Image: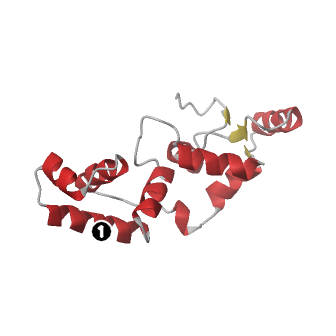
Amino acid sequence: MIHNSNIKTLLVTNIVNKYILRLIRNEKIQGIVLKCSDAEELIFALKQVADDKKYYSSLVANLVFNDSPEMEEVRISKREKQILTLLAEMKTTAEIADDLSISPSTVKTHRRNLLQKFKAKSLLCLLRLACRQNLLNEETDYCGCCYKKFIGQLN
């Protein structure tokens, strides 16, 4: 994405991920409209951005300006990311230990630390929260669990 102060950017998307939220917070884009929005909202957003104002669809504004703990960005180490990815692949503790050449107790310690960092009560919760922060697969914009929740909020 080109960042030029003279260029005004209105993003039209159906995906809102960590990267897009960062662009909004860093004021790299002036507005965002969801693809499911009607023509009137799109025209209004275009006029707002053209007039040097900002415009965010209501759902996006709730995500950007909501201080809920679910939106807190959790920082994890490279090793924790590896373990998280392997957990998402449904690998057992023994398989993860073997894949990474570490002991099973080290895997259990990393898993316990991840659960604490994400304030998750189960492995499923951990994976969903990690997915919502785009930590499981950074090449894609969303995964199934996040996208379904996002679409559910639109209806």
Disc 1 residue crowd, few under 14, some 14–19, many 20+, Cα 10 Å? some
* Horizontal and vertical percent position of residue 50: 77, 33
Q: In which quarter of the image is residue 66?
A: bottom right
Q: In this view, does 46 lie above or below 91?
A: above
- In the image, is residue 129 above or below residue 82? below
| Residue drawn where x is 79% and y is 33% of the image | 46
Q: Can residue 93 be seen in this view?
A: yes
Q: Position of residue 57 (x, y in %)?
A: 75, 46
Amino acid type of the residue that numbered disc 1 sits on in the rendered structure: Asn
Residue extending farthest to the right is 40
Left or right of 37 in this view: 125: left
Percent from the top left, x then y, of residue 75?
36, 59
Closest to the observer, 140 or 32: 140
Where does residue 97 sit, x and y in percent of width and height? Answer: 16, 54
Instruction: Tell me: 73 left or right of 27.
Output: left
At a point 22% along the width and 68% down the height, the residue shown is 109
Disc 1 element: helix
Q: Is residue 93 left or right of residue 9?
A: left
Q: Which residue occupies the foreground of this view, 64 or 30?
A: 64
Residue lying at 30% horizontally and 69% vertically, measured from the top left: 112
Dot 1 corresponds to which residue? 113
